Amino acid sequence: HSILHSYTIHLKIMSDGADLIHRRPLTGLSTRLSKAGGVRASSSKRRKKGHNQEKAALLAMVVFAAIFIPLGLLMRLFLGRGNTNGDPGSALSPSGGEAAAKSKNDVFAVKAIENKQLDGPLAKRWKPRTSGKDPPHNIRGASNPAKLLTESKLPDNPKEARFQSLYRDKFDQSALGYDVRNCPSTPPEDYPRGWAAPEVLTNWNPNDVTTISPKYREVYLSLCVFDYQAQYDVALAYRNAEKPFVIRNDPSVMEVVRRWDDDPEYLHKKLGDENRIYTERSPKNHFMYYNVRKRKQVRNWRQPENDVVSMSYGEWLERALLREAYALDDPEIKARSDELREKRMTLPNRDEEDIPDDDEIQVDNDRESEKRMKWYYFRLNAFLEEAKGDTVDKFVFDEVAFFDPRNTTASHFYFVEPDEQRGINCRFGMRGIVAENHYDLSRNMIAILGGERRYIIAHPAQCSKMALYPAQHPSGRHSSFDWSNPSDWDVHPEFRTAEVNEVVLHAGDVLYLPTSWFHYISNLSLNYQCNIRSGIGHENADAIRDCGFNPKDKPKDVSEEQ
């Protein structure tokens, strides 16, 4: 007789790119079958050793059965164990099989817990689910996961618990000199701490954007993370000192998150399938900003591969969901993307003459097969003077009220100079998109209203190590090489000594970047980001001037924050 020693089922998840591979055995089944095989094997080796020995063995078996079988039945009766399939975790048992099937979606969670208030089957069908039952591997640097499970209380919010399970601080208070979640009222002298850029990028390549539990990322976090309701005054002191930080748990921000992130169909219903919005497009996942009006200022300039087309929100959502489905191997998300595509194919074709007369906008003549392979950055630029009537501008200002300077109560914290506001600029990102390193010419408040983004930031004093395009270049203020490619570090050896830190932002987080701070962005999932500007700080003007830029010039272009 053949012996079955083990039976293990592996689930393999592969994302588009160099993402993590996670294999998870379904235990219980292998153990039970192995033991059963062993019993059969030992039974087959018994030999007859005489008539008396057989009688003795038979008598012993009868006595054993007479005592222990009734005892076992009584124990089952009193303890209420009625699972006749054995191990409750077994895939052969009804409860175990159901749990195994459900766990596939648990580890794929990238959004909030499924909202039971949503209407319609489509709203529930494609949304990634999370049960919130899987405990974090490590929360805030804890070194003993087993002890953590018994001694710490997990967050009540399943989305927050999942976030903490995937992203762990690499350094604690003893290494940094301060607790990033309980920072002192005055910024430390060396705040925020930085590390060599190659170290941070080697630890986590920016192109790796999918992390699935029980895997997790160690984050080089040195920015303070403040609670809006408990640490408002301290956060305000850091803002006034022109130091970068993260603030979360603002009720006004979380209200938008509940609409945009928790209800997957909300924005689709509002923005629809007909309104065409400027959308950046690229055959690669890396996007480089450029000002096409400066193209004649640089001889033999070659435009980056990304360009701009017009696209409805429904079409962008279709493409973004397809990326999610590929990365997470989720058929429900794929089905929703297919439904959106089928609906789009029934809509009237848009004539080329309907495209705005703008030399930045290209006609989208890609075949359907080509569209499915490209990356798209949906953008909404809303201006206060246009926020009236039935316009996208009014919709954005009504939705993101905490960024509306007219709403002085909700927006007070986010504007240093309200009179210098330049509108609300939103970028809806696809999983995998990378925005190349750059600095902006004014103060920046960046809110994540759905999904996750990773920001790698650096002080303006690192300017000389960033290999920036010059001011007159169409991509001025941006690094001229690919940070994610180690071979490019040899072309620009000064970059090896550049100091950076990083933060992973999720829905409800607002990042403050003072004037001229560098930032490099990876989109870790389908996400919604909006930002505002509020004047120019001059505390780092000398560092920027040393790199050949004039920090006193007031910016004239529309925000290119990505």
Image (tube, helix red, strand yellow):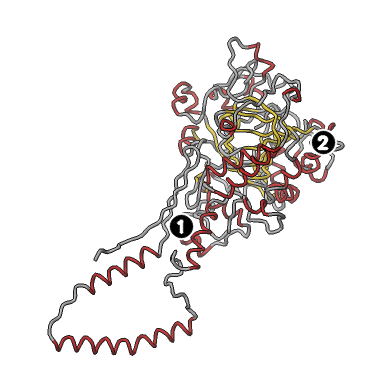
Q: Which residue is mark 1?
A: 144
Q: Residue at x 66, y 51 (%)?
A: 122
Q: Secondary structure under badge 2?
A: loop
Q: Which residue is mark 2?
A: 391
For label 1, the crowd category at 10 Å Cα-Cα, with few meaning under 14, some 14 to 19 and many 20 or more, is few
Residue sitting at the far left: 50
Which mark lies nearer to you, 1 or 2? 2
Mark 2: which amino acid?
Answer: Thr
The one nearer the camera, 400 or 103, is 103
Vertical placement of 299 versus 229: above or below? above
The one nearer the camera, 33 or 212, is 33
**Residue contact at pointers 1 and 2, CB within 8 angstroms:** no
Vertical placement of 554 versus 415: above or below? above
> Would residue 505 be found to the left or right of residue 217 on screen?
right
The one nearer the camera, 248 or 49, is 49
Mark 1: which amino acid?
Answer: Asn
**Residue 177: image location, x then y, percent:** 54, 45
For label 2, the crowd category at 10 Å Cα-Cα, with few meaning under 14, some 14 to 19 and many 20 or more, is few
The reply to whether residue 262 is visible in this rendering is: yes
Report which quarter residue 384 is drawn in. top right
**Residue 368: image location, x then y, percent:** 59, 32
> Would residue 342 be found to the left or right of residue 217 on screen?
right
Cα–Cα gap, marks 1 and 2: 53 Å
The reply to whether residue 505 is visible in this rendering is: no
Q: Residue at x 48, y 41 (%)?
A: 19
